[in-house]
Image (cartoon, helix red, strand yellow):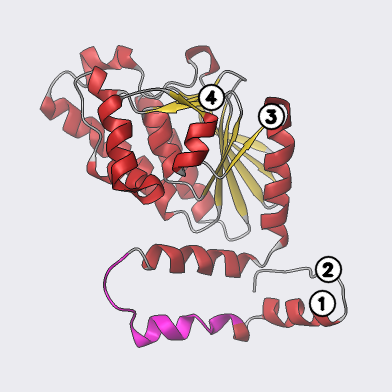
Amino acid sequence: MSTATDPVVLLDRDGAVATITLNRADKLNALNRAMWIGVRDAFHEVSADPSVRCVVLTGAGERAFCPGADISEFETARASAAQAAEYGKLMDGAMEAIADCPHPVVVKVKGICVGGGLEIACLADMRICQESSRFGVPVNKLGLTMGYSEIAALIGLVGKTNALEILYEARVFGAAEAKEKGLVNRVVPDAEIDATVAESVSRIVAGAPLVNRWHKKFARRLEQAAPLTEAEIAEGYAAFDTQDFQTGYKAFLAKATPDFEGR
């Protein structure tokens, strides 16, 4: 089944897996206003669906995940600080929708992942790329800044020192360096990217979906400095009251494959 949340952003479902595709291959999937809205709406849709167990975010075509902003919009939609702030609300809405998605989100990177494309990828849970993929945030060459939330996501992956190097030098660098810096989880030969992502997603989907959502929630909470409350600590044991726990441990004792239902 396939539905389009917007002509330039596609949402496809294959069982428990939702695939969101940046769909402007003729422009290397450069981000424009319609795409930011489409990404936001697609993630809101999958986030509200408890039958989803994993989300794959990717770009159409073989040449790029996303090279960043569609520069042609700057003259009309982002020509001043006031316009940029208004446009930034669209970007923030999409970024928040990705970050707030309760399901595991895996980015499949083919080719270029630069600027806004890298900013989006940083908000996901995992990134798997090709050996030929290229990364970077060359915004200072445009005389522009990266926003607070995007910088925070970058720092969360690579640390402050590496993040500032990426922003200061504005280099576009290869997959091996991206892996070394912590930007990506895995680098695979170009021809193996689809199969590798499919295998990873299959392993995620086979796990208990409630547990995956809890782990994502717990990891996000641990980024906050405030001490855990008693209620939050207690939630760490809530899985013991689920049907999936009964299914999982009985299957383990029987040396069988569990069939989790998400309840």
Residue 207, given in percent of the width and then of the height, sits at: 69, 64
Q: Is residue 231 magenta?
A: yes
Side (left or right) of 55 relative to 168: right
- Per the model, the C-alpha gap separating discs 2 and 3 is 31 Å
The residue singled out by tag 1 in the image is 251
The residue singled out by tag 2 in the image is 257
- Per the model, the C-alpha gap separating discs 4 and 3 is 23 Å
Q: Is residue 222 magenta?
A: no
- Per the model, the C-alpha gap separating discs 2 and 4 is 37 Å
The residue singled out by tag 3 in the image is 189
Lower position in the chain sequence, tag 2 or tag 4? 4
- Seen at 73% across and 60% down, the residue is 206
Give the residue type at disc 3: Pro
Side (left or right) of 191 relative to 240: right
Q: Is residue 258 above or below residue 117?
A: below
99 or 219: nearer the viewer: 219
Give the residue type at disc 1: Ala
Badge 2 crowding class, 10 Å Cα cut-off, few under 14, some 14 to 19, many 20 or more, is few
